[in-house]
Image (cartoon, rainbow, N blue to C red):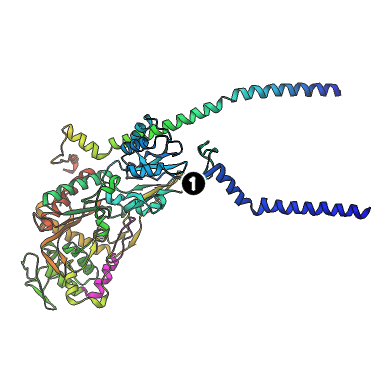
């Protein structure tokens, strides 16, 4: 009985040791990957900020008005209103 | 033998007690000091700067936001050719070479060279691969609409410690909310002082600032600024301002003044332009003040629309002064509707005498004249009303037509808005909601400040103002088909104890549509040269903006 338990413990120790080596080996490179991902996030954030800045500049009314003027749009002089005719019964 | 054992035992005990006391001293009493000493050897405490909150217009467009910029720093111990590095940094960053040189000569591991450096310039500098130069991301303020609503927004400058701080307008008023809270972290470095990990152990992480959503409507602000600019040029005025408000809520829809400045380049402009004249500059309102006095008299039931003015046939003499009408035309037995229509000063003197000083002061206070409106902008100044014992008879008379009394434009706009809102005065404000960093939106509800006049008096006054628009001096420029209530103003400018004979402040205040007002607006022009009258300068600007607003809000003409 004691021998069986001893054998089991030895095997378990060996399996766990191998398992630890394997897991360590697998995750040892993920630190580098994590670093790269962080770098990528930083680059994308900066890019996003710069695109946002460009978007806001281009969608400002000042910019839209000057672009519209370049394309030949002008202020409307007069506006008119379309009114719906009264129903026949009310005439 | 036993004595020897006891002696040794005692010796060991004393030794252990001594060790325990010493351990207590180092580990408890001196713990913090030693911890700080250790920290200073392997790292340094650094401040984590929060990102400033955005300011958005009602359409959620960020009129003030942040853009990426960089802090350029140097490690003087790593810089090999200091002369060449100084030259390059001076040229690329456009900074003073002497200060760069002085920084590089310091016996330190880290010295800042320039803040808020544009990413393109940073890229250019980085491509030169200068040894000992590093970069750290930071944020700088960016105003996509440039100078739009500049005096309302304010700007971000530096405080006495060199940290970002908002000045004037919303940037100043809501600075604490916008700036957020700084964080603290420890930067670990090696024996040579080089940072080995970027930021570890954030003891207190930074909290970014909250964002503000304004009630300002971007298209309205744009239109108002455009029309005001055109008007100032057309009428040769030295400056001008316009405020547009929703009378039912007190929400400011637009607030513009010229000349103005670019908040992103505020250093390039005169400091005089930083303050918002709409809330900071006092002026004598002239005839635009008449609706307040007349509506007070109507509310107090001392006059009625058909009350005849018995003193209006000629100039009125009070306390040795003779009071004339603006055009020296006199209408005998004119009624109160015509007094407003003709902007009759003698008629207003009669009204003020019927009202009396006590009641007039009481009504003016209820209209908010002489006290801050409470608008959420930095820099509101309010001239107080004179104490009652300093009012002479002639002061009562001149105040009735808006001379001899100083107010700010926002005070008058808010008071007239009370007439437009059925007698209920609202607190003016520009921020309608606050967005916190945890995703909550706190709405700012409209606040009623009081009811200076009854809804009946407000309705009668509105009709008088509609009549003044349709039949008064400014009728030539009115919008046909729309019921707009309004009043012109032409005020003399006091200089060194008398009035300037050559220049005036012209204005027009009104609201529309009169029966269900969507906006109340006050236009003020300073010293127009083409004409000195409000009906020929401020009124056309008012109606050109009103026309745009009716189109923008899809309000069709509905008869006059």
Is A25 rendered above or below residue B109? Answer: above
Taking the image as shown, residue B440 lies to the left or right of residue B312, namely right
Residue B150, image x, y percentages: 27, 49
- Where residue B367 sits, quadrant-wise, is bottom left
User: Please, which residue is most extreme toward the left here?
Assistant: B329
Residue B45 vs residue B202, the one in the foreground: B45
Report the residue at 60% width, 23% height from top. A26
- The reply to whether the magenta stretch includes residue B357 is yes
Which region shows up in magenta? B355-381
Residue B413, image x, y percentages: 24, 58
The residue identified by callout 1 is B183
The answer, for residue B89, to whether it is visible in the render is yes
- The reply to whether the magenta stretch includes residue A71 is no
Q: Residues within 10 Å of mark 1 (few under 14, many from 20)?
A: some
Report the residue at 45% width, 29% height from top. A40
| Chain of the residue displaying label 1 | B
User: Please, which residue is most extreme toward the right here?
Assistant: B1
Residue B519, image x, y percentages: 24, 52
The answer, for residue B479, to whether it is visible in the render is no
Report the residue at 31% width, 50% height from top. B154
Residue B166 vs residue B230, the one in the foreground: B166
Residue A40 vs residue B234, the one in the foreground: A40
- Where residue B473 sits, quadrant-wise, is bottom left
Is A81 rendered above or below residue B269? Answer: above
Residue B545 vs residue A30, the one in the foreground: A30
Residue B15, image x, y percentages: 78, 52
């Amino acid at each position: 009985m004691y021998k069986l338990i001893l054998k089991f413990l030895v095997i378990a120790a060996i399996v766990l040791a191998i398992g630890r080596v394997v897991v360590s080996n697998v995750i040892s490179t993920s630190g580098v990957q994590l670093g790269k991902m962080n770098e990528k996030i930083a680059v994308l954030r900066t890019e996003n900020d710069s695109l946002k800045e460009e978007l806001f500049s281009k969608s400002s009314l000042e910019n839209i008005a000057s672009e519209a003027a370049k394309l030949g749009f002008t202020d409307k002089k007069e506006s008119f209103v379309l009114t719906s005719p009264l129903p026949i019964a009310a005439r | 033998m036993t004595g020897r054992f006891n002696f040794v035992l005692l010796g060991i005990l004393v030794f252990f007690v001594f060790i325990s006391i010493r351990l207590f001293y180092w580990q408890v009493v001196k713990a913090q000091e030693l911890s700080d000493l250790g920290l200073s050897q392997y790292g340094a405490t650094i401040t984590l700067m929060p990102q400033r909150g955005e300011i958005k217009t009602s359409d959620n467009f960020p009129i003030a936001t942040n853009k990426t910029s960089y802090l350029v720093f140097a490690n003087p111990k790593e810089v090999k050719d200091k002369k060449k590095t100084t030259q390059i940094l001076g040229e690329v960053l456009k900074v003073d070479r002497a200060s760069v040189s002085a920084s590089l000569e310091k016996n330190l591991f880290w010295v800042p060279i320039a803040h808020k450096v544009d990413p393109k310039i940073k890229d250019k500098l980085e491509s030169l691969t200068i040894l000992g130069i590093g970069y750290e991301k930071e944020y700088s303020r960016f105003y996509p609409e440039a100078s739009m609503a500049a005096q309302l927004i304010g700007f971000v400058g530096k405080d006495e410690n060199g940290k970002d701080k908002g000045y004037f307008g919303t940037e100043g008023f809501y600075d604490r909310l916008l700036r957020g809270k700084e964080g603290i972290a420890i930067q670990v470095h090696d024996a040579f002082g080089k940072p080995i990990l970027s930021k570890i152990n954030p003891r207190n992480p930074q909290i970014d600032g909250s964002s503000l959503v304004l009630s300002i409507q971007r298209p309205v602000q744009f239109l108002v600024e455009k029309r005001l600019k055109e008007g100032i040029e057309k009428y040769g005025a030295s400056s001008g301002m316009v405020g547009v408000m929703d009378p039912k809520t007190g929400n400011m829809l637009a607030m513009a003044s010229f000349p103005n400045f670019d908040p992103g380049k505020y250093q390039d402009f005169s400091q005089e332009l930083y303050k918002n004249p709409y809330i900071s500059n006092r002026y004598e309102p002239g005839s635009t003040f008449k609706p307040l006095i007349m509506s007070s008299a109507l509310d107090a039931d001392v006059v009625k629309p058909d009350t005849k003015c018995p003193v209006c046939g000629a100039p009125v003499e009070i306390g040795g002064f003779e009071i004339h009408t603006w055009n020296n035309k006199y209408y005998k037995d004119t009624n109160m509707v015509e007094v407003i229509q003709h902007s009759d000063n003698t008629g207003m003197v009669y009204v003020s005498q019927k009202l009396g000083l006590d009641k007039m002061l009481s009504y003016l206070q209820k209209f908010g004249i002489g006290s801050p409106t409470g608008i959420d902008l930095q820099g509101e100044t309010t001239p107080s009303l004179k104490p009652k014992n300093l009012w002479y008879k002639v002061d009562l008379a001149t105040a009735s037509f808006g001379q001899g009394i100083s107010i700010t434009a926002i005070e008058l706009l808010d008071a007239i808005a009370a007439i437009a809102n059925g007698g209920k005065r609202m607190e003016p404000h520009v921020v309608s909601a606050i967005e916190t960093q945890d995703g909550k939106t706190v709405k700012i509800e409209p606040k009623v400040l009081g009811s200076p006049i009854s809804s009946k008096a407000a309705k009668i006054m509105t009709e008088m103002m509609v009549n003044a628009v349709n039949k008064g001096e400014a009728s030539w420029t009115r919008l046909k088909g729309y019921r707009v209530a309004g009043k012109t103003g032409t005020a003399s400018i006091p200089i060194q104890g008398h009035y300037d004979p050559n220049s005036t402040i012209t204005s027009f205040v009104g609201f529309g549509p009169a029966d269900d007002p969507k906006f109340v607006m006050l236009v003020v022009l300073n010293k127009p040269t083409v004409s000195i009258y409000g009906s020929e300068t401020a009124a056309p600007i008012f109606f050109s903006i009103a026309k745009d607003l009716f189109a923008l809000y899809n309000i069709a003409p509905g008869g006059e």
